Image: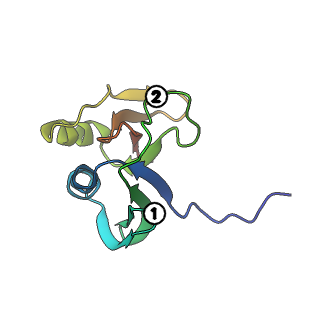
């Protein structure tokens, strides 16, 4: 018997540059910054980001952030965001200078998706709402 998990609470992403992280997650993606803390002991900022009033992403921003592009690394493969129109969302990202992959079709669900990356190289996805 599994745990009584109701839903995902949040995803934590380690970032290396405060300004780039805020610009990307708050201004480019449109998440709302609700709370920020700084820990002098850990030399780390912690930001809580919300989407439609729900806690979604926690960012740890510190100078010693590992390079997620260098294998081996374990953990997050990608974080997916539901959108109504993948093609329009990709165009919106491109207009803001974000490099995206091609829009593809999930043959199992018939929905479109596309991958893109944050400034630290964390893989993100746009997925068509059903």
Residue furthest to the right: 1
Question: Residue 120 at what x, y percent from top left?
Answer: 34, 40
* Colour scheme in use: rainbow
| The quadrant where residue 121 appears | top left
Q: Mark 1 vs mark 2: which is more N-terminal?
A: 1
Measured along the vertical axis of the image, is residue 65 above or below residue 1? Answer: above
Using the numbered discs, state the Cα–Cα distance from disc 1 to disc 2 in whole angstroms: 23 Å
Q: Which image quarter is the N terminus in?
A: bottom right
Depth check: give the residue in front, 72 or 79.
Answer: 72
Question: Residue 98 at what x, y percent from top left?
Answer: 22, 37
Q: How many marks?
A: 2
Q: Is residue 120 visible?
A: yes
Question: Residue 52 at what x, y percent from top left?
Answer: 35, 68
Give the residue pinned by disc 2: 70
Which residue is at a point 44% across and 45% down the rendered structure image?
80
Measured along the vertical axis of the image, is residue 120 above or below residue 35? Answer: above
Question: Which type of secondary structure does the marked residue at label 2 adopt?
Answer: loop
What crowding class fits label 1: few (fewer than 14 Cα within 10 Å), some (14-19), or many (20 or more)?
few
Which residue is at a point 55% across and 34% down the rendered structure image?
73
Question: Residue 99 at what x, y percent from top left?
Answer: 24, 31
Give the residue pinned by disc 1: 42
| The quadrant where residue 58 appears | bottom left
Which residue is at a point 39% across and 34% down the rendered structure image?
112
Is 76 on the left-hand or right-hand side of 1?
A: left
Q: Is residue 129 visible?
A: no
């Amino acid at each position: 018997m599994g745990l009584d998990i109701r839903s995902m609470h949040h995803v934590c992403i380690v970032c290396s540059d405060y300004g780039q992280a805020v610009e990307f997650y708050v201004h480019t993606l449109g998440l709302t910054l609700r709370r920020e803390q700084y820990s002098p002991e850990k030399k780390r900022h912690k930001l809580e980001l919300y989407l439609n009033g729900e806690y979604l992403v926690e960012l740890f921003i510190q100078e010693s952030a590992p390079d997620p592009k260098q294998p081996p690394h374990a953990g997050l493969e990608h974080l997916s965001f539901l959108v109504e129109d993948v093609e329009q969302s990709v165009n919106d990202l491109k207009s803001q200078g974000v490099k995206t992959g091609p829009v593809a079709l999930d043959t199992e669900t018939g929905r479109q998706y596309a991958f893109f990356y944050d400034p630290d190289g964390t893989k993100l996805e746009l997925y068509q709402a059903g």
